[in-house]
Image: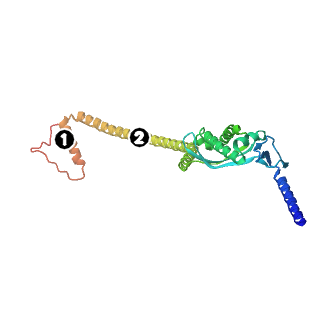
Amino acid sequence: MAQIIHILIGVGVGLAVVTIISLFISCVSRLDTDEIAIPYNIITKNLRREVKTTGLHFGSPGFTLITFPSVFTSMEFDDISCLNKDGVSISLDVIFQFRADPNYLYDIVMQFKDFSGYKQILAATGQGAVHDTCAHFNTTAFQSMRGFFQVKLLDKMKESLSPFYAILRDLQVNDVRRPSDFETAVKDKEAAKENIKIAENERPKLLTQARTEYQKALKQAQIIQERADTDSTIIRNQADAEAQAIRARYSTETDTYVELKNKMRFNVESLLTYMAVRVIGTSKNDIYINLKSPAQVKYEL
């Protein structure tokens, strides 16, 4: 009987030791260098305001720690879509770094329970900030003012997350994607601008060529005009010379016949008869004349 009692006492002592050790272990929590926490007792439902940092921490039975990262954590919005100022749907990737303000860790836990709940409200609020910022930029600005858009989004994100005691350090906007139809239109517009630029660069060259051709045409026209003027002057002078020679010849003949008519005392008819006889007499070929009968071939002188 005594042996049984000793065995029961030993078992009881062992159970007590195990229970004490278990309670001791449950009352100890360890925080890494990248963690902070506030104590919470799951038995008494008591949440303390004291912020714990790295190391081992002891508490009463039911003691636990609600942990948060003490360093900045990244939150990513992959392929988030928003409507810009033109009503065009824009897709983009956003990533920012944040951490909970240790001075307000108690208030954060009271509102959002733990870090998981805290991240959910930050994600929903951050997406709203992206949509609000997108609405202030048109489609072209997303390409030409991406840096400014990123700065404005960071400011809007800080403003939106500040009520939740979030500290933001940096934000990046990557891979802004516009609708394919708009991208095609932009490429066509850029190609048209490039063609216009090329045409503007070619314009002085083409104008120079055109002016050169124009000057050559003017020179050629001047040469043709001068040649025509020279040819017309030569032809006119030749015609004047020939006309003068003909007038001189006929004037000489006229003077001769007038002198003959006066010397021989011919009238017009007798002069014509004389001229006809001379023509017939000097001809080397036979001449046939059809005269009315009776023909008068002799006149009194």
> Marks 1 and 2, Cα distance to the nearest angstrom?
44 Å
**Crowding near pointer 2: few (<14 within 10 Å), some, many (20+)?**
few
Q: Residue drawn at (61%, 43%), measured in percent from left and top?
A: 142
7 with respect to 96 (left or right): right
Position of 196 relative to 12 (above/below):
above
> At label 2, which amino acid type do we have?
Ser
Out of 136 and 127, give the one closest to the viewer: 127
Instruction: Name the residue tied to disc 1.
Output: 273
**Crowding near pointer 1: few (<14 within 10 Å), some, many (20+)?**
some
Which of the image's four quarters has the N terminus? Answer: bottom right
Out of 12 and 54, give the one closest to the viewer: 12
156 with respect to 248 (left or right): right
Quick one: which residue is furthest to the front in this view? 1
Find residue 255 and report its horizontal and vertical position in percent.
29, 35
Q: Which is more N-terminal, label 2 or label 1? A: 2
Out of 250 and 2, give the one closest to the viewer: 2
Find residue 294 and report its horizontal and vertical position in percent.
9, 44
Instruction: Name the residue tied to disc 2.
Output: 232
* SS type, badge 1: helix
* SS type, badge 2: helix
> At label 1, which amino acid type do we have?
Thr
Out of 100 and 27, give the one closest to the viewer: 27
